């Protein structure tokens, strides 16, 4: 669905403000360009709580097609989780800026129904879902569970390849675009972006990790 002018203007302004933050910050904007949700996470992710996700699902059921933008301090394009979140919440657009001059966008179809979202979720799960941690292992083999969880999270945080994106476009009807941010030079990301792997560190320390984030 093509974005409204009001929403695009609001998103561009937010993206300019948040692009160089060291933590991920997500912002939801409605079709009128109004900000109705903001949240700051850590360097490599920012997640919705269960309640927040339910609230957004309710908005989607009422026919709202909101837009989500966020910054990626670790330079990556849209992640598998970003794509899954956009599909689940039936957003109009999901966008991520990087601090080396790029804006990554995934646009969803105009009439993207609950049924379409379900089908797309199954497709994405089949495409990317490997090594889902099992509850039995959590109870019986704690170390194996931690390893599986780590692998699962790494898989979900990864960005699909160009070929995978083409396949997703064909199957789900979404459209990916990467734009240069006006007035900025696209620079090569550093070999070792700051705080990459913070999530993996948290898992190693045994801190609780939730499964939904953007
Ligand atoms: Zn993201």
Image: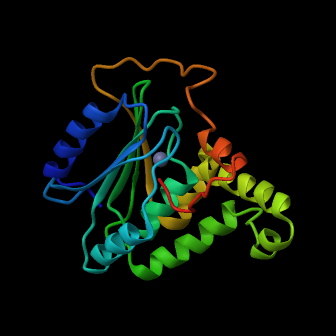
Visible in this render: residue 128?
yes
Number of marks drawn:
0
Q: Position of residue 183 (x, y in %)?
A: 28, 20
Quadrant the N terminus occupies: bottom left
Residue 88 relative to residue 142: left or right: left
Quadrant in the picture for residue 104: top left
Q: Percent position (x, y) of residue 38?
A: 29, 51
Give percent across and percent down for residue 203.
Answer: 68, 50
- Residue 76 in the image, given as x and y percentages of width and height: 53, 37
> Which residue does the image show at 80% across and 76% down from the upper left?
136
Which residue is at a point 64% across and 46% down the rendered structure image? 202
| Residue at 26%, 32% in the rendered image | 17
Is residue 40 left or right of 202 when viewed as pictured? left
Depicted 24 relative to depicted 142: above or below: above
> Does residue 186 sit above or below 85 in this rendering?
above
Q: Is residue 12 left or right of residue 129?
A: left
**Which picture quadrant has residue 48?**
bottom left
For the question of whether residue 111 can be seen, the reply is no
Q: How is the model colour-coded?
A: rainbow
Residue at x 50%, y 66% (from the top left corner): 172
Is residue 106 placed above or below 137 in the rendered structure? above
């Amino acid at each position: 669905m093509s974005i409204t002018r009001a929403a695009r203007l609001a998103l561009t302004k937010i993206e300019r403000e948040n692009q160089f933050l060291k933590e991920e910050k997500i912002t939801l904007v409605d079709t009128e360009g109004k900000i109705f949700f903001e949240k700051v996470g850590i360097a490599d992710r920012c997640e919705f709580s269960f309640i927040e996700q339910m609230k957004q699902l309710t908005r989607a059921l009422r026919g709202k097609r909101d837009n989500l933008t966020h910054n990626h301090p670790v330079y990556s394009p849209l992640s598998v989780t970003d794509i899954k979140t956009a599909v689940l919440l039936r957003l109009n657009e999901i966008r991520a800026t990087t601090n080396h001059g790029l804006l990554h966008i995934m646009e969803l179809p105009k009439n993207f129904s609950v049924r379409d979202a379900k089908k797309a979720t199954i497709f994405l799960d089949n495409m990317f879902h490997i090594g889902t941690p099992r509850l039995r292992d959590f109870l019986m083999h704690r170390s194996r569970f931690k390893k599986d969880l780590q692998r699962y999270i790494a898989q979900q945080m990864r960005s699909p390849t160009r070929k995978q994106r083409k396949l997703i476009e064909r199957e789900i009807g979404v459209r990916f675009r990467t734009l240069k941010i006006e007035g900025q030079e696209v620079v090569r990301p550093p070999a070792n972006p700051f705080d990459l792997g913070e999530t993996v560190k948290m898992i190693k320390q045994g801190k609780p990790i939730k499964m939904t984030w953007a």
